[in-house]
Image (spheres, rainbow, N blue to C red):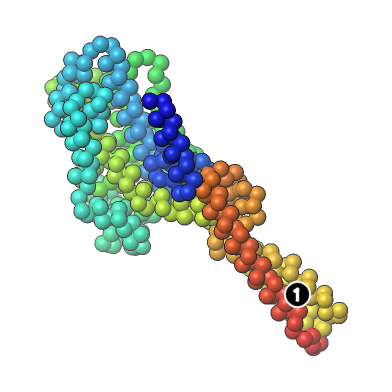
Amino acid sequence: MDDEQNRQQEDWLNSRKNRLPSFTEVLSRRTRPPVDLFMFYIFLQREGAEDILDFWLDVQQHENLCRAYFKDVRKSGRTIKEDWPQYWEYARRRGSIYGTVVGLQPNAVKRSTTSTADMINDQEKNAMAHPADEKRGGLRSTTPGYEKDPDLDQPRSTTPFSLSGRTSALFNLKRASRAPTFIPRSAAISRMDLIASAERIFFRYLSPVGTVNSPENHEIYLPPALRIHTFPLSSTQEPKSQSDLNMMAHIPDMFHSQKEYCFRAMEQDAFPRFLRSKAFGNLTPVSALVRLVVGLILLWIGLAAGFALIFLDVQPKSKRFFLFIPFTFAILFLISHQYELDPILIFLGQSESTPFRMLTIREPYVKRLLLGRAIWVTTLVSIFVVALTLLFWAVPGHRL
């Protein structure tokens, strides 16, 4: 068995040498910079959409907490049916993502894993399949891509990555990265711990902004079919009535459909743009913009010096070859802005995480891709610099 696992691990590592990582691999922390989870979080933070990833990570931890609870129950010698009959009945009828842990039949597990796809209707699928079209729409509430939330004065976008109501990180300092919801396991996990975990997720991500007076309230977009409007339980009071006990049975699977929707939205929208940004370039937008400005200034200096040498008829003519110095830096910065790639940093094995802060490129396939693009950019820079320098050298001098 160990040999088989080692062989599968080796095959997986070999396959990774010739392809970009998948979104699942990034989320499971199996990739290295600059296409790891940390860099993806920074990418979303720059777009003001990191709450979606925070939600996914928090729900993942909530589900891990539920799995730990079920495993503790089984280790104690009791069955889930004996310990939590309401949840057992719910999972038996509706299916559950914890089917193998709680001892359900395989067909019950299968029902739970396919229920998410059934809950997302064609409208939501189209919204995820064409996120760019949604974002190109206006930011007004009268735009067809937006719907009015009856509880809020501001419109809600129909895609999780809309820029409505957000300020670009280029012009606004974002809050520090929050750690996902965490419950220290100093004692056995109880059902009240599960309620507390679900309660934090609801009030942090699903409760409309303004209804909860907390700086941690950052509502994410969900399609109407997946929204949860109320959380009837309380982590400070143990459920006693039959209706509360039945509601508590929903807690383990409560956010799984929403988590799957966010996964698909990130996978189809943000993740491809993240790969284009980090696997084919190594600059942040701010750094690329700075290079554009500096490149234009240096190009103006080079052109001004070149025309001065021509119209002053400076001798010897070979002095014009020194124009390659401003031309080299100007063209390098301009092409670096165009490709969002600095070849010098690539040759040093560096990529930007935040503006002008570097990290080492460790993903083998990404390193090869960037190296090839760096060679291409260097070739373009050399061609343009040689052409400009020879052009200004060949023009006859004429003193005005």
Can you give x and y, in whole percent of width and height, for residue 284 in the image? Answer: 54, 53
Callout 1 crowding tier (Cα within 10 Å): few <14, some 14–19, many ≥20: some
Choose between 285 and 102: the one closer to the eye. Answer: 102
Please identify the quarter of the rendering in which residue 396 is found. Answer: bottom right
Residue on which disc 1 sits: 305
Is any atom of residue 52 visible in this view? yes
In the picture, which quadrant includes the C terminus? bottom right
Horizontal side of 218 relative to 42 (left or right) equals left
Q: Give the structural element (helix, strand or loop) at label 1.
A: helix
Say above or below: 319 vs 61.
below
Please identify the quarter of the rendering in which residue 227 is found. Answer: top left
Horizontal side of 46 relative to 99 (left or right) equals right
Can you give x and y, in whole percent of width and height, for residue 215 in the image? Answer: 41, 37
**How many circles with numbers are drawn on the protein?**
1
Q: Residue at x 33, y 39 (%)?
A: 205
Please identify the quarter of the rendering in which residue 183 is found. Answer: top left
Can you give x and y, in whole percent of width and height, for residue 287 in the image? Answer: 58, 55
Q: Residue at x 51, y 41 (%)?
A: 32
Is any atom of residue 236 visible in this view? no
Say above or below: 340 vs 256.
below
In the picture, which quadrant includes the N terminus? top left
Q: Residue at x 41, y 25 (%)?
A: 2
Which residue appears farthest toward the top when viewing the image? 77
Which amino acid is tagged 1? Answer: Ala
Say above or below: 370 vs 382.
above
Choose between 89 and 42: the one closer to the eye. Answer: 89
Q: Residue at x 35, y 33 (%)?
A: 60
